[in-house]
Image: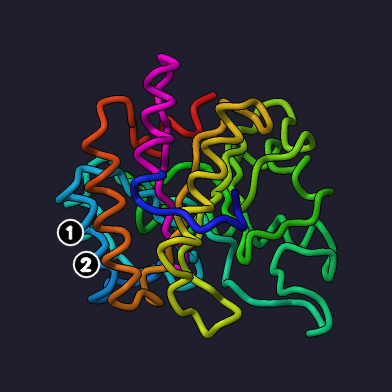
Amino acid sequence: MSNELCTWDDLDIELTRWHEAARTVTLWWRDDDASVAQPALRRLGELSARWQVPLSLAVIPARADSTLLAILDDCPGAKVLQHGYAHVDHGNGAEPAAELGKHRPAQLVLDELNRGFERLNDVLSEFLLPVLVPPWNRIERSLVTELVARGYRGLSCFSAREPYTGCAGLTVSNCHVDPVHWKKAGAFRGESKSLSMLIGHLRARREGAVDADEPTGVLTHHWSHDAQTWAFLERLFEQTVAHGNVHWLAAQQVFAA
């Protein structure tokens, strides 16, 4: 499905198939790279409120500011997730960007994450969940097994979750749809390709090709949205909310033990 050109009618057909199978479509929305209130983030909050779609906001601790509170207050079911520490690439440039990679001692990385969580707890405690979103969706596997001991109860990256993520006490729920084409300077990926990612994961869940219990996650980056990306999200929420068997989950539901 990922290479197919899909339409909104194709999405409607897939949602209908779930309905005919007496199954509920579970979706969730994660937005990354938040730090302070800005116009794009306010617009995101307005979108969440208008369609009553819960927002899971991944906030960078080192840059976090209490101005986010006003936006979160107006979003139904909004929660804050920890987006690494400072969103800094510690690689040498020859490998994919990563803050939580193998480039530094594990103890140093984990201690830095702890400081980041404490920072978020100081600023945004009423919305904060002990869920880690690694910058660039990358984390060294050896670090994953240490997260529970550090107090984390959730982890979110990108693509269908893998077997290693099932360590006791840690709920893993990734995102599977990204409407931004990062290799093209953050331009909109396009309606057809974005829908293909969404329908592809839903179909794979329905047919048992991936973990059917993992909610399908939509990933956004508010600061990068152009007019086409905003229009896509508006229509996505409109069409899915109209279906009685579609449930947009809040983060506390996604990462429930």
**The residue tagged with tag 2: helix, strand or loop?**
helix
Residue 14 lies in the magenta-colored region: yes
Q: CA distance from mark 1 to mark 2?
A: 5 Å
Disc count in the image?
Answer: 2
**The residue tagged with tag 1: helix, strand or loop?**
helix
x and y percentages locating residue 97 in the rendered image: 71, 74
Q: Residue at x 17, y 59 (%)?
A: 46
Left or right: residue 63 compared with residue 75: right
The quarter of the picture where residue 53 lies is top left
What residue type is disc 1 on?
Glu
The quarter of the picture where residue 45 lies is bottom left
Compared to residue 18, the image places residue 132 above or below, namely below
Q: Residue at x 78, y 40 (%)?
A: 145
User: Which of the two residues, 176 or 235, is positioned nearer the viewer here?
Assistant: 235
In this figure, which residue is indicated by the disc labeled 2? 43
Compared to residue 253, the image places residue 65 above or below, namely below
Compared to residue 40, the image places residue 199 above or below, namely above
Q: Residue at x 58, y 47 (%)?
A: 156
What residue type is disc 2 on?
Arg
x and y percentages locating residue 10 in the rendered image: 41, 44
x and y percentages locating residue 206 in the rendered image: 55, 27
In this figure, which residue is indicated by the disc labeled 1? 46
Quadrant assignment for the C terminus: top right
User: Which of the two residues, 123 or 145, is positioned nearer the viewer here?
Assistant: 145
Do the numbered discs 1 and 2 sit on residues whose CB atoms are within 8 Å? yes
Q: Which residues are magenta?
A: 11-33
The quarter of the picture where residue 251 lies is top left
Q: Residue at x 24, y 39 (%)?
A: 241
Local crowd size for mark 2, using a 10 Å CA cut-off: few (<14), some (14–19), many (≥20): some
x and y percentages locating residue 155 in the rendered image: 61, 44
Residue 100 lies in the magenta-colored region: no
